Amino acid sequence: MVRITEAEARSILTPQRSGALDGAYAFTLNPYRGCAFGCSYCYAKWFTHHTDLEQSWGSWVRPKLNAPELLYHQAHKLAGASVFMSSATDPYQPAERRHRLSRACLEVMLSMLPGPAKVTVHTRSPFVLDDLDLLLRFGERVQVGVSVTMDDDGVRRLFEPHAPSIERRLETVAALTRAGVRTRVSVSPVLPSNPRRLARLVSEVTTRAFVDPIRFPRPEGYGREIYSAHHLGRFLRPGHADAVARELRTALGEENVYYHPRK
Ligand code: SF4
């Protein structure tokens, strides 16, 4: 049971000055606080700065009801800028079906003249297809990234039990690509998989991929215990992410796979 509490935000655009998105995007945009998918490894729970919210991550969502209005008043910042939606929530989690905040934010950005030069929508959810009409209106300025972190739905149930199945995600990418939307698959973080099979599945639905190894900046929790409980420890070796990137590069071409190896 996910507790939904409507809220008002003070701001909606977060400048990117550090972290994985620094340099690639000027702003991140999160229409929701919290995420019903509650992935075991999710780093966004740390950003709550609140022990109860961190520990109950996945069981609460706060739709930011004024997100579109706040965004509308930031038009001067977005002219020619790049926006990542979203870094700390899934913009197409089930609450979006009721609140339509991600849709409204896309509509606001489309109405800006000049608007953002680049918008990346990042999700695990087929509900992104609800907004295909808007995505097509962005043309080359938009790309949709869908996280496909493994090739096996049994493994997915261990790490991401409340998120859509691998099959539905792949079908979503395929539908977007067929419709003419620029797509990529994000293997981020790299979870246990058969690299060759994963690369084959990805290459059937898109031409580009992003690969990022799993990191554990904190010693406790965040999915690490799942590896030992299910004898998956071998997939934590850096060689596994290297193999995933190698197979994807073979399938998609070197230039179409971004890989940032773990140091
Ligand atoms: S979908 Fe993204 S934001 Fe939501 S819990 Fe999973 S990793 Fe975190």
Image: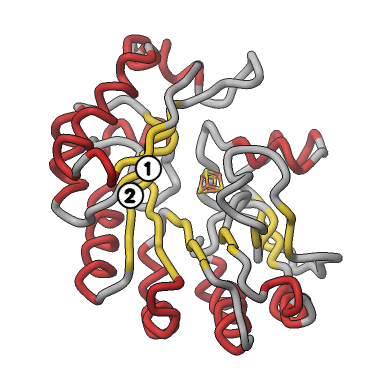
**Residue 60 seen anywhere in this rendered image of the structure:** yes
In primary-sequence order, the first of circles 1 and 2 is 2
- Can you say whether 247 is above or below 179 in the image? above
Q: Is residue 261 left or right of residue 174?
A: right
Q: Is residue 243 left or right of residue 158?
A: left
- 58 or 125: which is nearer to us? 125
Q: Position of residue 229 (x, y in %)?
A: 41, 13
* CB at disc 2 and ligand 1 closer than 8 Å: no
Q: Secondary structure at mark 1?
A: strand
* CB at disc 1 and ligand 1 closer than 8 Å: no
Label 1 crowding class (10 Å Cα cut-off): few <14, some 14-19, many 20+? many
Mark 1 or 2: in front is 1
**Residue 66 seen anywhere in this rendered image of the structure:** no
Label 2 crowding class (10 Å Cα cut-off): few <14, some 14-19, many 20+? many
Q: Position of residue 71 (x, y in %)?
A: 72, 76
Asked if the residues shown at circle 1 and circle 2 are in contact, with their CB atoms under 8 angstroms apart, the answer is yes
- Can you say whether 251 is above or below 120 in the image? above
- Taking the spot 39% from the left edge, 15% from the top edge, the residue there is 236
- Can you say whether 238 is above or below 161 in the image? above
Circle 2 residue = 185
Q: Which mark is residue 210?
A: 1
- 182 or 87: which is nearer to us? 182
Q: Amino acid at mark 2?
A: Val
Q: Secondary structure at mark 2?
A: strand
